[in-house]
Image (cartoon, rainbow, N blue to C red):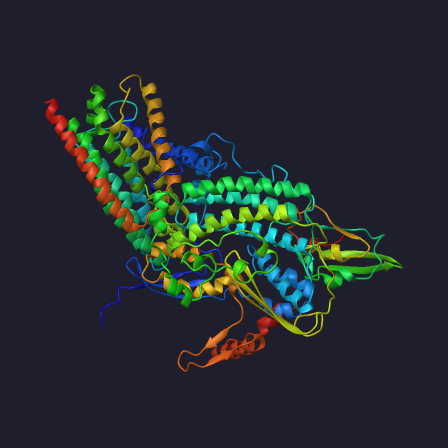
């Protein structure tokens, strides 16, 4: 029991995830800056930002429900941390694998987006309300392509457990090439899930000031920022576990280092997307997701079903 | 009464999308803007009144600071009016130098605008690149004039500084570097799909509406109207330069982007011609401090459009009346028209596409009574008395406040 | 033909280059020769005509007599526009612009100084 507690809270649970997310926020911001010919922040900047926010006064608007207002960020952070427990890190099995944990992880990852909506809705501010509505609309746009893109490889592997998927592809690495369209779709929709450009519509600073987080400050905003960072790591880890679980099953140290390398690759691609593209408008994003990404994901499912039939 | 699902969202006066304070009240239906109203005046500083108590020479520096980005335009236009009143014949070398600084300022302004446009549509890489390139122009201007903005280059009767051949060479090198970068922007920005999706069809202003609402500058030229003071009513040596007036038929924000990027290329061409054709000679003539009585009205093509200055002199060394009409005031009328029917997400880029400079715009107040239709012209003193009386009726006595401010 | 991701080659290229940022104030700022910074006054050349006071747009300079044919100049650095009109107008070349622009101070009264 003590071992489980240690694993959940310290490593590879809450504290380790927090530290890793701060490291990858630094990587993201530094790459983004170097691409724009700037210097970028020093390595301790994300930690400094969190410490600064924790030391500031937390202001709750008088019209807002203060209990809900304070509870929502906690739910968001708890959900992403819980999702991380089911993703394989350095071995084929994650910390606590069970059958159908892919569905559970996906539900856990939907909770932060719901909390962004609730946060904006309960803030009793005009800009926050608009940001909340945009977050929900964006959820309807990217959710279906993302789920379908992750569904394809699961269908081929014949299991809903992430550890099971990883084990299957570890044994049949050639089948990974079948899933490349789904990989592309999931990288694009991951950008939508994480609300980064070109899909940072709910957080469009020039249009609706702070978006959903307009009224948040102090330690509540620090929790939301940690949620955003941990979401980045969890989604990147999920993509790398499902789409390229290569060379694992050896020693734990090697597996862990490879895990970091895979995360770096995914984060690099996401940052490149962030730097190279302008922000979409809401209707353009919905059109793009439903007219382009969803059919590609559907086609991927068809291909996977055909290949599965051929294999049997 | 049916429930009104529309919400009124205020864009400004303080907002991350706006560089300067102006207030737009947008009536939203979902994500679409049903109605928009424009309120300006937050930057009114009383420049025209202040100009009446300073000499003509001091006014160069005052009117230059109407705006940071079009400072040379205001200064040149004003100095042209005073030289017309004094009957001074400005030497040709001075006119060439004024045109050189004017075109460099145009480059600076358009590169700044390109960065702002990138920021408004969420394309931060363009913002960072364009402002990095802007540093080349600012360093060049600092080398030539001694300051990065508010150049202080004009004197009544000519210019204050000359240019050495080494400086001219450095200007040409800077222009070469900038031209290469602008060609990259033409390819990578005007040809980028996500940028086109955000800019095409947004903020439509058809040719008839542009003429009816008195748009000016790149906004007018993007709607297909070939109007440019440098060709239509030129001052200085613009008739001797060979350049094209850039128009575009898109009549939307994308068209305005195309016009500004291509105008950058024209400016590079003009600067090379200016440096090549610049004659030798004096850089200023002496103009007496007292200007004979008269009125003068001059126009200048600022980076944002047609800038108009009017000066009335009365024989002393201080002007009797100075009036400035900046191009953004002309474009302000078109903003409400362009915003209505569009999306909220497009509001920042539509406002930014007229390249607003509300520091230039806020001048005196003309009050129209909506009910009776009667017009009243308020001057400084009258407006102050009216506001004091109005607030006194509400129970707010401001006379104590003004005494505190006066004891500086 | 418009395609997307046009900036990607330049972005990747930038990763290999040095950044364009000048690390001021760790690195000294480069100002050109004729930069208009703070004023410098040479009291042996001043004759007390006060032309500089008359032309200043901001009333930033005051010339005071200390002794017979000896004058001192007091400048309000916070009012001065650094336009250099006083430098141009002085017939005796008693004023000039230096290259010093690092004049910020936490105490407003220290910005009124004799030069």
Please give left or right for residue C67 compared with residue A204 in the image: right
Q: Quadrant of residue A93?
A: top left
Please give left or right for residue A66 compared with residue B269 in the image: left
Residue B344 x, y percent position in the rendering: 34, 57
Residue B13 x, y percent position in the rendering: 45, 61
Residue A250's place in the image compared with B369, above or below, is: above
Report whether residue A194 is seen.
yes
The N terminus of chain A lies in quadrant:
top left
The residue positioned 59% from the left and 60% from the top of the image is B235
Please give left or right for residue B38 compared with residue B382 in the image: left
**Nearer to us in this view, B233 or A308:** B233
The C terminus of chain A lies in quadrant:
top left
Residue B385 x, y percent position in the rendering: 55, 78
Q: Quadrant of residue A305?
A: top left
**Nearer to us in this view, B97 or B109:** B97
The residue positioned 68% from the left and 42% from the top of the image is B165
């Amino acid at each position: 029991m003590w071992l489980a507690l240690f694993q959940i809270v310290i490593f590879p649970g809450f504290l380790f995830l927090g530290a890793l997310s701060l490291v990858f926020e630094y990587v993201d911001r530094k790459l983004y800056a170097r691409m724009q010919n700037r210097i970028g922040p020093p390595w301790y900047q994300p930690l400094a930002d969190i410490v600064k926010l924790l030391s500031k006064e937390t202001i709750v608007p008088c019209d807002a429900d203060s209990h809900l207002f304070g509870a929502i960020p906690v739910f968001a952070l708890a959900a992403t941390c819980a999702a991380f427990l089911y993703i394989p890190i350095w071995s084929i099995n994650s910390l606590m694998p069970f059958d159908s944990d892919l569905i559970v992880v996906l539900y856990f990852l939907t909770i932060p987006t719901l909390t962004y909506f609730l946060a904006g809705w309960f803030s009793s501010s005009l800009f926050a309300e608009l940001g909340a509505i945009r977050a929900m609309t964006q959820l309807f746009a990217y959710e279906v392509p993302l789920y379908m893109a992750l569904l394809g490889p699961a269908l081929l592997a014949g299991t809903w457990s992430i550890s099971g998927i990883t084990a299957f592809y570890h044994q049949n690495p050639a089948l990974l090439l079948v899933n490349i369209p789904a990989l592309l779709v999931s990288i694009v929709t991951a950008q939508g899930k994480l609300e980064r450009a070109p899909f940072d519509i709910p957080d469009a600073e020039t249009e609706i000031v702070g978006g959903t987080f307009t009224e948040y400050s102090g330690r509540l905003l620090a929790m939301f920022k940690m949620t955003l960072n941990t979401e980045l790591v969890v989604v990147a880890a999920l993509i790398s576990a499902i789409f390229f679980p290569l060379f694992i099953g050896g020693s734990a140290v090697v597996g862990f280092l490879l895990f970091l390398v895979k995360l770096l690759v995914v984060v690099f691609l996401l940052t490149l997307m962030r730097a190279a593209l302008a922000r979409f408008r809401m209707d353009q994003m919905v059109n793009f997701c439903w007219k382009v990404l969803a059919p590609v994901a559907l086609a991927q499912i068809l291909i996977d079903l055909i290949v599965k039939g051929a294999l049997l | 009464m049916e429930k009104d699902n529309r919400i009124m969202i205020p864009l400004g006066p303080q907002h991350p999308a706006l560089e300067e304070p102006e207030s737009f009240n947008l009536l939203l239906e979902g994500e679409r803007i049903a109605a928009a109203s424009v309120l300006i005046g937050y930057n009114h500083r009383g420049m025209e009144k202040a100009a009446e108590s300073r000499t003509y020479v001091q006014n160069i520096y005052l009117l230059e600071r109407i705006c940071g980005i079009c400072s040379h335009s205001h200064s040149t236009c004003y100095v042209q009016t005073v030289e017309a009143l004094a009957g001074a014949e400005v030497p040709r070398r001075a006119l060439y130098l004024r045109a050189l600084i004017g075109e460099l300022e145009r480059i600076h302004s358009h590169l700044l605008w390109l960065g702002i446009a990138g920021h408004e549509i969420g394309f931060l890489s363009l913002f960072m690149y364009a402002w990095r390139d802007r540093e080349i122009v600012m360093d060049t201007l600092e080398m030539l004039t001694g300051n990065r903005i508010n150049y202080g280059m004009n004197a009544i009767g000519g210019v204050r500084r000359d240019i050495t051949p080494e400086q001219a060479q450095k200007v040409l090198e800077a222009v070469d570097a900038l031209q290469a970068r602008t060609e990259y922007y033409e390819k990578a920005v005007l040809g980028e799909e996500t940028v086109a999706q955000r800019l095409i069809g947004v903020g439509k202003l058809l040719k008839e509406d542009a003429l009816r609402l008195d748009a000016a500058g790149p906004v007018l030229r993007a709607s297909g109207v070939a109007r440019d003071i440098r060709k239509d009513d030129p001052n200085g040596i613009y008739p001797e330069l060979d350049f094209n007036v850039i128009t575009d038929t898109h009549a939307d924000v994308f068209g305005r982007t195309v016009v500004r990027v291509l105008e950058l290329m024209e400016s590079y061409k003009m600067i090379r011609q200016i440096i090549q054709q610049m004659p030798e000679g004096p850089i200023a003539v002496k103009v007496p401090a007292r200007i004979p009585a008269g009125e003068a009205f001059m126009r200048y093509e600022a980076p944002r459009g047609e800038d108009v200055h009017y000066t009335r002199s009365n024989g002393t060394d201080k002007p009797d009346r100075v009036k400035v009409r900046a191009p953004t005031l002309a474009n302000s009328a078109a903003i409400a028209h362009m915003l209505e029917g569009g999306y909220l997400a497009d509001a920042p880029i539509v406002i930014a596409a007229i390249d607003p400079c509300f520091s230039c715009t806020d001048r005196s107040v003309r009050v129209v009574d909506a009910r009776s239709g009667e017009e009243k012209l308020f001057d400084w003193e009258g407006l102050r008395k009216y506001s004091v009386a109005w607030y006194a009726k509400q129970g707010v006595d401001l006379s104590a406040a003004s005494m505190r401010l006066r004891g500086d | 033909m418009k395609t997307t991701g046009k900036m990607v080659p330049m972005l990747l290229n930038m990763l290999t280059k040095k950044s364009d940022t000048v690390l001021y104030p760790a690195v000294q700022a480069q100002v050109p020769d004729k930069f208009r910074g703070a004023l410098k006054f040479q009291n042996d050349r001043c004759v007390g005509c006060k032309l500089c006071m008359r032309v200043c747009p901001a009333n930033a300079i005051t010339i005071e007599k200390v002794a017979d044919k000896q004058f001192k100049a007091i400048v309000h650095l916070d009012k001065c526009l650094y336009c250099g009109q006083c430098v141009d107008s002085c017939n005796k070349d008693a004023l000039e612009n230096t290259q010093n622009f690092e004049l910020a101070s936490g105490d407003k009264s220290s910005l009124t100084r004799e030069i």
